[in-house]
Image: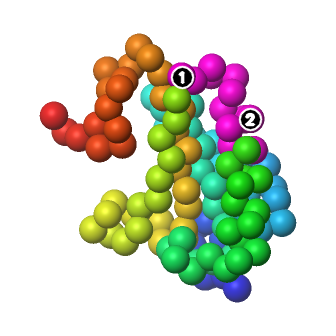
Amino acid sequence: MHDPACRFCLSNDLLVDTPLALLDRFYLLGSIETGRPAQAMIVPVRHIETPFELNAHEWAELGTALEQAKSVLARFEPSGWTIGWNVGAVAGQEVFHAHLHVIARFDKESTAGRGIHALFSSQ
């Protein structure tokens, strides 16, 4: 199943970049933000809007997808990780195809030692 207008549905050929890895149920995208190269997204191949719609097979493969993301981002030598979903417009979801953000974190960044909220705080 896919949404013909969704830029994350692989069958639509709307991606602006090439997936870094393809699994059976997920694919991995690198960051297209030039100022934030040490992050990736894990995207279900099947079009779903939220992680609440993942089926048992997808949940079972998610661990493998996380290991892939960690392996791809290891070259940045991170000190830690922030991993999260934005679900719904009010939570900041901009593309309504579920995707899990995997963000490498570093000792020397200004938000070191602070959680996910610090990454998105305007203060």
Seen from the viewer's position, the closer of residues 80 and 95 is 80
Q: Which residue is mark 2?
A: 71
Span of residues in magenta:
68-79
Residue 113 falls in which quadrant of the image? top left
What residue do we see at 55% from left, 44% from top? Answer: 102
Name the amino acid type tagged 2: Ser
68 shown above or below 104: below
Q: Is residue 16 visible?
A: no
**Left or right for 106, reference 17:** left
**Left or right for 56, reference 35:** right
73 is within the stretch colored magenta: yes
Image coords of residue 98 (percent x, y)? 54, 68
7 shown above or below 41: below
Image coords of residue 50 (percent x, y)? 50, 74
Q: Is residue 78 visible?
A: yes
Image coords of residue 68 (percent x, y)? 75, 44
What residue do we see at 73% from left, 44% from top? Answer: 67
Name the amino acid type tagged 1: Ser
Tag on residue 66?
Answer: none
Q: Which residue is mark 1?
A: 79
* Residue projecting furthest to the left: 123
Circle 1 SS class:
loop
Placement of the C terminus among the 4 image quadrants: top left
Image coords of residue 38 (percent x, y)? 56, 31
What residue do we see at 61% from left, 65% from top? Answer: 8
Disc 1 versus disc 2: nearer the observer: 1
First-in-chain label (1 vs 2): 2
Label 1 to label 2: alpha-carbon separation: 14 Å
36 shown above or below 23: above
Residue 44 falls in which quadrant of the image? bottom right
* Residue projecting furthest to the bottom: 1
